[in-house]
Image (cartoon, coloured by chain):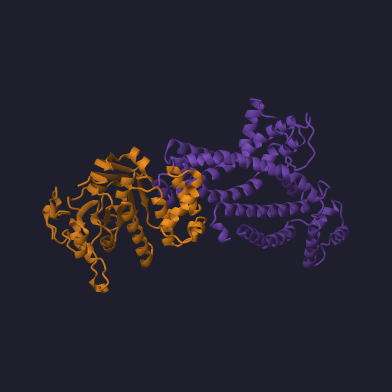
Chain colours: A purple, B orange
Amino acid sequence: MTMLITILRRLLSAIPSVLGVIVVTFLLARALPGDPAAFYAGASATPESIAEVRSQLGLDRPLLLQFADYVGDLLHGDLGHSVSSGQAVLSDLLTRLPASVELTLAALVFALVVGMPLGVWAATRPGSFVDHACRLLVTLGAAFPTFFTALVFVYAFYYRLDIAPEPLGRLNEIYFVAPPQVTGFMLIDTLLAGDMEAFRSAFGHLVLPSISLGLFALAPIARVTRAAMLEALGSDYCRTARAMGLSGRHILFTTALRNATLPILNVLGMVFSFLLGANVLIEKVFAWPGIGAYAVNAVISSDYAAVQGFVLMMALLFIFLNLVVDLMASIADPRVRYDV
Amino acid sequence: MRPPLLSISGLDLDFRTRSGTVKALEGIDLDLARGEILGIVGESGSGKSVLSFAIMGLLDGAADLRVANMTFGGMSLDAGTVAEMRGRELSMIFQSPRTALNPIRKIGRQIEDVLVRHGPVPRRKARAAAIAALAQVRIPDPERRYDAYPFELSGGMCQRVMIAMALACNPTMLIADEPTTGLDVTTQAVVMDLIRDIARDRQMSVMLITHDLALAGEYCDRVLVMHAGHIVETAGVADIAAGDLHHPYSQRLFAATPASSDSLDDLAAIPGTLPDLRGTLPACRYMGRCDRARPDCAEGPLPCHRPSADHTVLCRYPL
């Protein structure tokens, strides 16, 4: 019951953010340099034809009316058309988003699986060799730009050692037929299609990009896990647990780690949204058909509708992500349920 | 006379820190009889809590503990044996009970954890046993409280949960480290009465650590006064109540304890602060604050006076 109220309250509190995002994306498109009318009218446009395009696009109407049109279109799921692809922006984004989300999730899983145990391990032995090794790895991971690590990985594992598949997208489409799109996640779709060979190929293609992206996320996760665990292990309740003679395992995992979950969760939300934005370079290196590359192309070719749609979708995604993190936090910590 | 339950002699404890070695405890000797309630009194930093951590084996890596002899129930107490006894034979409750309980685990589950760990009840009966433990510390409506989180309970209620947890496995000794600090006066009395009643019922020994000499005088059979890592005076409760104290520090501590008839002007603060426990210290660590001090107080060993059978005073010029 409390849980349900928490969810509802949190959903309601997201509404102002959504409204804000809509206003900002609208104004952003108006504030971008360049005149869209001149752009759409083409290179050989005369002032008259530009004015004509402007009135066609409704850009000569008052800002408030334009905003009303924009909101009306949004309500119909219409984000406009992309000039460069010729498709509706919404369908462009929806076909590309799963690729980016899959890559980001895989990177996050990698970072979690490596970062959390590393942080816990370092926290149980502060000042030891493990602690220093953890710090070194974290520093290296954060210091090298993702595209650099990605290029090194491609050079080493594809070109030199030849154990990784070619860095060209999500699946080798010469040997495998892309499965029918159900979730858009290649790993899940290949499994749903029952095509184990394709699954293996998709998995192989995912390994290098997700590790190069995940190395960057490793740093904040390992660091915050270590800090949160150190705090929890030094806390009064862990001292109580020791005084009650509870086992070391119980103290480390049931007592300390569960209490450390909250800060880790918060960082996880930040890292995820950060990765979603940062994976554009990885997508370039691995020819990954995601939204990052799409957005960059849209900016370069002044594809206003596409940029606007991208910003809107990312903002909504961030809001959704924060919602999920908050709800997970209220599951992890009963105190959160009361003061959302 | 029966042998004491806990017997310590010649306990020294140093902490190695970056700014030098802190001589936290020196020459501690103490005996605790079965069923006895022993008070350990002193101001903050006098080494009371550290002594209890040393007994419980809960010191951190920077601690250097040297003991001539420490036995519990006839067995030598060291890092290995004490780990077996914690929570089972030897238990502890802490000050600020709200932070001493796991904030995100139901209190009933926390008691169950202790029960299941030490195994006096099978797992499927653990819930009932935890509820019984809650009832034993006079928590009303224990079935419902089982599902409460610490932040949903008052400080006094949390301390009762702590007591229930510490006593769940029927230990023979309980260390209570400032159990009433942070509780209001009426709750203090309730919690202390509870500890005393359970101790009487079960013949359990209690080591009550407090800075409140009046509280110790009310609930303890015997009181140790600590100052800067030394036990300066040991006295029976009758002497404490009468103010028949012979060490200058104990006397000051007694004068600083409010009685109901006192006005604020009657309370005398003890001048000075605890000495820095790093570096070389005089034999009597109270020397710098004492108005009876003479140069030879710096020379050890200090004589031990015995005004009566259970009364010892470590001072060259006692009152």
Q: Which residue is drawn at 64% across and 30% down?
A: A155
Residue B178 appears in the picture as rendered: no
Please determine whether, in this image, residue A88 is positioned above or below residue A69: above
Which quadrant of the structure image shows residue B68?
A: top left
Indicate the position of residue A257 as horizontal and vertical percent values.
50, 46
Q: Which residue lies furthest to the top in this view?
A: A161
Quadrant including the C terminus of chain B: bottom left
Please determine whether, in this image, residue B42 is positioned above or below residue B279: below
Q: In this view, does A14 lie to the left or right of B143?
A: right
Which quadrant of the structure image shows residue B318?
A: bottom left
Indicate the position of residue A35 as horizontal and vertical percent values.
78, 57
Q: Nearer the viewer, residue A337 or A186?
A: A337
Q: Nearer the viewer, residue A313 or B304?
A: B304
Q: Is residue B169 left or right of residue B309?
A: right
Indicate the position of residue B64 as horizontal and vertical percent values.
30, 42
Indicate the position of residue A240 as horizontal and vertical percent values.
41, 50
Q: How many numbered marks are there?
A: 0
Q: In this view, does B255 lie to the left or right of B173?
A: left
Q: Which of B263 and B294 is in front in this view?
A: B263
Please determine whether, in this image, residue B56 is positioned above or below residue B135: above
Q: Residue at x 43, y 58 (%)?
A: B158
Q: In this view, does A316 lie to the left or right of B139?
A: right
Q: Residue at x 61, y 41 (%)?
A: A109
Residue B146 appears in the picture as rendered: yes
